[in-house]
Image: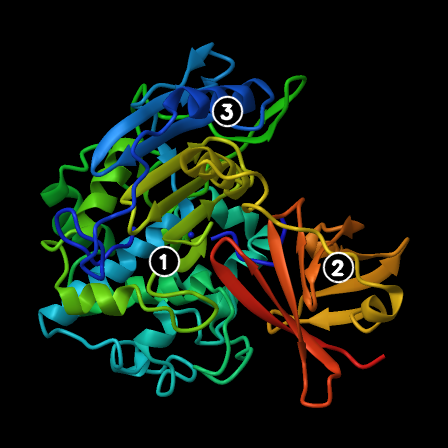
Amino acid sequence: MFRLFPAAFSFCLFFGALSANGQPRHSPAVIDTAAIDHLLDSASKKYAFNGVALLAQDGQVIIEKGYGWKNIKSNTLHDTASIFQTGSITKAFTAAVILKLQEQGKLSVSDPLAKFLPGYPNGDKITLHHLLTHTSGIYDYTQSLAPYKFIIKKTADRKSILNIFRDKPLAFEPGSGFSYSSSGYYLLGMVIEQVTGKPYEQVVREMIFRPLGMSHSGFDFRGLKSASRSTGYSVFYRERQSVAFDMDSTVLYAAGGIYSTAGDLFRWTEAFSGPKFLSAASRQQALSPYRSNYAFGWAVDSLFGKKFIAHGGLTANFSSYILHFVDEDITLILLSNTAGNLWDLCVKTSQLVFGQPYPWGSRPEAEPGKEVLDQFAGTYSNSDKLSFFISLKDGRLHLNGSPATRVSDDPLVSLGGSRFYSRRFNLEICFVKDAEGKVTGLRSRREGLSLDWKKLEQ
């Protein structure tokens, strides 16, 4: 999996027909739904998208349709009722519950973890805010699930999961860095149980699912008996498909355990965006990025100069994405029963929504000389201890990653000065220099998240 960014990621602070700053929304007058349907259908026929898409404008659904196979063996196609595991989209639900409990005076996001889980390592200096914003430094247990396959597809007790990450050293002092960690949200689920005295799943049902009418959402996907249940595929090509085991919700828990439909997720997005679910103060806190463009369960950024919030999810056999443009009140939801990258399709769909050329709008390509490019070549590392290598070949910088990133010989396009981007991954790179003009690192940005990388001495 491409690990320059976590695969992880609707916000708005507006009421009625106004944006967050009280100005009229700038939603396109007419969206070419036929062109978007053609794009999604073409992607489906190329086995590049297999699932359900929903597009809404000003609170009204204008596209909701199934594309491809719900189950190839039984010859059943997707429809709008298809149910999927959503993976890390769950994090926004967990964050919302924490904020509701804060509104009720039962906790504060500034509380230390030790207040709720006494004896947890470094729990006195790790706060709930650190867990919500991925700034705790706690190791991400999902990176080590492969050796623990014996627990992935059956009910897992808390001790089995905690043993994966509890005693690993912190990557950095809490609050001083960013490292996407599902472990933090796993712990938040335990905090919710401590505060409420109820199972996490019950709290989410009572606080969110039932009030919003999300009748097709739940947790125990493996045990779900429904004709709408999608079959998940780890391999999905025209010539070959491979059904993958479904990850148990007790493994994914508060970090990724929810299953849902596109329609239910739209109900959630609409409720979260409005004034009734959270107070104005809570919404502002939930959607204020702390580090690396990440807020509480949402990434916050812009595309084509238009502000959005987003989050994706990825399991062994499902992928999901919610993308919401704030001022335009446009929501795109993509759910797939294959493990893959939905961000690129989100971008292409958004380009049709806003009439923008691919990729990422109009990007003039500069042609810097060899003496300019030489300074950027080198090895770069981040807080997750991942690394990649910038090399100069045939007058152009090329990106190569360590084996875990699966990035190989990707040519970068220059935007002038210290700015470059990758067409293949829709990845922006800006090199950082010190006061003397020496390149010391870079900042990469993708899917609404930014990460800092340090240049290693040769």
At label 3, the amino acid type is: Leu
Residue at 25 percent of width and 29 percent of height:
61
Residue 345 picture location, percent across and down? 51, 36
| Side of 446 relative to 239 (left or right) | left
Residue 224 sits in which quadrant? top left
Mark 2 nearby-residue class (10 Å; few <14, some 14–19, many ≥20): few
Q: Alpha carbon of mark 1 to alpha carbon of mark 3: how far?
A: 26 Å
The residue singled out by tag 3 in the image is: 39
Amino acid carrying mark 1 in the image: Trp
At numbered mark 2, what does the secondary structure look like: helix, strand or loop? loop
Residue 402 badge: 2
Above or below, 89 relative to 96 = above
Q: Residue furthest right?
A: 394
Q: Position of residue 67 (x, y in %)?
A: 44, 20
Tag 1 residue: 298
Percent coordinates x, y for residue 144 in the rendering? 58, 58
